[in-house]
C-alpha cells in the first residue's frame, strides 16, 4: 500500500514552453501533497504544500505564478512549470500524506527529471 | 528555521564494515525523524521513521537512534554490502513554525567497495 506515482518520469522541453507534472496517490486519499525540487548533488527543498480544494502554500522564494499547483482531487495534484527556462531543469519529487495528524508519514513518488533546453 | 546537517558528506568503506551516519537538527520541536535512501537519478526509499517519543527503530541491518533533546540522530548500518551504496538522507518533520513540513539534510554519499 501507500504508493505514489508521478508522470512523466522524464521530460525534455524547449525554453519558454510549459510542462505539467502529475502526482497520484494510487491506493489512498491524500488530503495534502507536497512538491520538492532537487538540484544536482543537492538535497530536496520543499517548494509548496497543496491541500485538496484550496490554494497551495508556497515556500519563500518560490514563484507561485511560475509553478502552478492544482490539487483538484484527493488522489491527484499537478505541478505546471510555466515558461520554463534552463535554470528550471531539476528533479521534481512529490509526496502525499493521508488524512489525519500532521506527523503522519508522507509517501514519496519516484520523481520527474525535467530538462529545459 | 529548522536546519538539518549530515556528517560526513561522503563515506567510502570496504565491504563488511559497520558504519555510522550522523544527522543533527537545530529545532528540537519535531514530530518525527526519517531516514531515506536515494539511488542515483531515483526517488526516495524510506528506511526508518522514528517518532519523537521513540528512541530508536530497527530494520534488518539498520538501526536508527534519536536524541531529540540534543538534536541528533544516527543511522547504524551493520555488515555493509556493495548494494548499500547510495545517498542517505535524513529528514525531520517539524512542529511549531515548521508545522508538518519535512526538512532534509544534504545527505551522505555512501560507497561500499567489494
Image (cartoon, coloured by chain):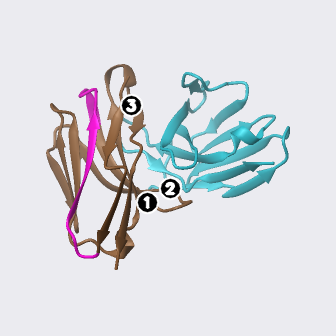
Instruction: Say which mark, if any, is on residue B100.
Output: 3
Measured Cα–Cα span from mark 3 to mark 2: 22 Å
Return the residue at label 1: A1
Q: Are marks 2 and 1 in contact (CB under 8 Å)?
A: yes
* Whether marks 2 and 1 lie on the same chain: yes
Return the residue at label 2: A27
The chain containing the residue under callout 3 comes to B
**Is A101 a magenta residue?**
no
In the rendered view, would you say B29 is above or below A3?
Answer: above
Mark 3 Cα shell of 10 Å, populated few (<14), some (14-19), many (≥20): many
**Residue lying farthest to the bottom in this orientation:** B114
Residue A103 seen from this side: no
> Any idea which chain is the brown one in this picture?
B
Percent coordinates x, y for residue B2 in the rendering: 36, 27
Mark 2 Cα shell of 10 Å, populated few (<14), some (14-19), many (≥20): few
Percent coordinates x, y for residue B32 in the rendering: 28, 39
**Residue lying farthest to the top in this orientation:** B97
Badge 3 element: loop
Mark earlier in primary sequence (2, 1): 1
Q: Nearer the viewer, residue A28 or A14?
A: A14
> Foreground mark, 3 or 2?
3
Q: Are marks 3 and 2 in contact (CB under 8 Å)?
A: no
In the rendered view, would you say A18 is above or below A25?
Answer: above
Amino acid at each position: 500500500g501507500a504508493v505514489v506515482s508521478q508522470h512523466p518520469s522524464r521530460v525534455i522541453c524547449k525554453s519558454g514552453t510549459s510542462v505539467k507534472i502529475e502526482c497520484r496517490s494510487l491506493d489512498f486519499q491524500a488530503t495534502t501533497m507536497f512538491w520538492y525540487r532537487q538540484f544536482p548533488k543537492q538535497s530536496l527543498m520543499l517548494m509548496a504544500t497543496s491541500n485538496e480544494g484550496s490554494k497551495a502554500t508556497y515556500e519563500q522564494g518560490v514563484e507561485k505564478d511560475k509553478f502552478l499547483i492544482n490539487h483538484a482531487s484527493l488522489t491527484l495534484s499537478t505541478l505546471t512549470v510555466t515558461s520554463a527556462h534552463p535554470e528550471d531543469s531539476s528533479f521534481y519529487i512529490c509526496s502525499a500524506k493521508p488524512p489525519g495528524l500532521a506527523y503522519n508519514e508522507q509517501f514519496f513518488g519516484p520523481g520527474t527529471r525535467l530538462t529545459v533546453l | 528555521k529548522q536546519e538539518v546537517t549530515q556528517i560526513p558528506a561522503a563515506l567510502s568503506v570496504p565491504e563488511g564494515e559497520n558504519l555510522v551516519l550522523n544527522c543533527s537538527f537545530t529545532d528540537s520541536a519535531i514530530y518525527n525523524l526519517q531516514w531515506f535512501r536515494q539511488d542515483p537519478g531515483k526517488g526516495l526509499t524510506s528506511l526508518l521513521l522514528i517518532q519523537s517519543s521513540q528512541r530508536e527503530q530497527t530494520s534488518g541491518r539498520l538501526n536508527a537512534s534519536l536524541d531529540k533533546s540534543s538534536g541528533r540522530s544516527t543511522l547504524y548500518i551493520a555488515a555493509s554490502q556493495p548494494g548499500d551504496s547510495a545517498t542517505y538522507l535524513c529528514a525531520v518533520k517539524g512542529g511549531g513554525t515548521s508545522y508538518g513540513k519535512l526538512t532534509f539534510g544534504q545527505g551522505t554519499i555512501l560507497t561500499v567497495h567489494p
